[in-house]
Structure formats: C-alpha cells, structure tokens
Amino acid sequence: AGEKVLARYCQNFIPSQIVSFLQNIHVHPRKIWLVRPGPNKNGVRGILGGDEELTDEGHAIASALGTFMESAVQDNKGYVDVWLSPMKRATQTAEYIRQDHVTRTVTTTLLNEVGGGDFAGYTFEELEAEFPQHVKARRTDKLYYRYPGAGGESYMDLIFRLRPLVIEFERKKRDCLVICSESVLRCLMGYFTGVDADDVPHLPTKKGVVFELSPHRDGCDIKQFQLEFEAHSE
C-alpha cells in the first residue's frame, strides 16, 4: 500500500494540498511519544509565556522521562528521533535522553507554545483582574480566541502553524519523541486521534504523563504512561 500516487490537473490549492498529504502518509508501524516538559519557574508562578528553566520537580520529571525512554526505545526499534522547541524547559528535558538512542534531534520554533502576545508575562490572576473581558472571551471560544498584540495566537493559529510538522510526522517511519507544551501536545494528539477541532483546546493532559501514539491504517491507538518521580514543593 502507498507505493504510488498518480495525480492529474491538480492546479488549485486544496487539491495540491491533498496530493501532498497522500504522498507522505504510509502504514508503516511506528510510535510517536508526546510529553510536556516538567514545571518551569514561570509556570509554577502562573505566569503566561516566558522562557524559564525547569524547577527541581521539572528535572525530576525529565530524569524519569529518560528512564522511561530507555526502556521504550529498547522495546521497539532501538533508536528514536527527538523533536523539541528551543525553549529552555524543552532543551533541558531532552538532555536526559540517552544520546546513543537518538538518531536525530530537531529543534524548531514550530513547537513553541501558543503565543501570548501582549499578555505574555501576566499571571492568570492579573488577567482576570485587569482584562476580564478577554478572559471571558477565551473561555467562551478557546479555539478561535487570539491573544492581542504582536505574536498573539489562537489555538486555530497554532493548528495551522503545526501543519508542516504534521506532514513530517506522517512521512517519517522512525519512532519519534516530541517534547512540547500543553497547547502543542493537545493539537498533535487531536490530529492523530481524530478529535473535533472544537474539542482540541480542552483535551486533558497531565504532568509527568507520556502519551504513546501508534498510527495505523484504521486510525491511531493511544496509551498513557505515568512517569515515576518524586514530587517537590516549589
């Protein structure tokens, strides 16, 4: 299956996108592991955005991820590609993955969290106090609400930003570990599991949980693995 694609008169945008997609999908078995970095200093304080380092608990989760991946990789193909954002919390998490199991490490801003725009640097309490209308608007329509100002994004903006990566993950036959923020994890998991776009911003994610995706011709199987780590009071 999937050895040849014939296309004729595909001159418009949508047909050309469909052809590009069909040229990249396959039914070769592989694993895609999605995981959030552990807590970072801004996240603990409830601050939107920023590029802070992992907390002690974040390092504990990263270490547990390294142990988990060592076992998971050995149980599968013995090697893995690692994809991550350039954010400090993601790069610090990736440092715990044994390099002799890694065939390729790709750092890309496409995996950055949804942009907070002018609200980056605010705590959620400050937003509720100073911009209650924006907080209400986002709660009402989390998919399309866009943070104001330069760099502000909505979940729908993020979905479109991730399209090139989705094609890349569809094309790849090697197992992949993706270290990404909660918003990116929701979008990727929503795509591979066929979740309606309206439900993507509300998909449940958990601290210290690895989501294992196994795409196949009939859809995608998903498993969750809770990492074993010592909780810290930051």
Image (cartoon, rainbow, N blue to C red):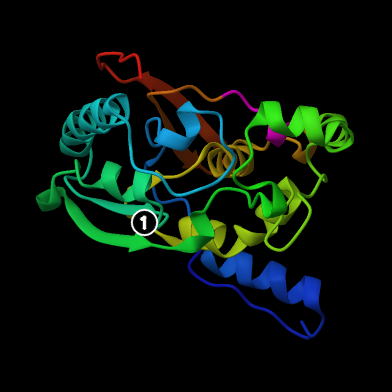
Q: Quadrant of residue 22?
A: bottom right
What span is colored magenta in the figure? Answer: 199-204
Q: Can residue 34 be seen in the rendering of this structure?
A: yes
Looking at the image, how many numbered discs can be counted on the residues? 1
Picture coordinates of residue 208, whole percent (x, y): 38, 24
Picture coordinates of residue 25, whole percent (x, y): 53, 59
Q: Is residue 61 left or right of residue 127?
A: left
**Is 24 in the magenta?**
no
Give above or below for 201 relative to 102. above
Q: Is residue 125 left or right of residue 214?
A: right
Q: Is residue 115 left or right of residue 66?
A: right
Picture coordinates of residue 161, whole percent (x, y): 63, 61
Name the quarter where the C terminus is drawn. top left
Q: Can residue 25 be seen in the rendering of this structure?
A: no
**Front residue (pair 54, 75):** 54
**Dot 1 surroundings within 10 Å: few (below 14), some, or many (20 or more)?**
some
Give above or below for 51 relative to 172. above
**Is 200 in the magenta?**
yes
Which residue lies at the image location 62% right of the left edge and 43% below the top edge?
A: 187
**Front residue (pair 39, 126):** 126
Which residue lies at the image location 78% right of the left edge and 28% below the top edge?
A: 129
* Residue at the outermost left position: 100
Q: Amino acid at mark 1?
A: Lys
| Secondary structure of the residue carrying numbered label 1 | loop
- Residue that label 1 marks: 173
**Front residue (pair 30, 232):** 232
Which residue lies at the image location 62% right of the left edge and 65% below the top edge?
A: 21
Which residue lies at the image location 57% right of the left edge and 65% below the top edge?
A: 164
Picture coordinates of residue 230, whole percent (x, y): 25, 14
Q: Main secondary structure of the magenta part?
A: helix
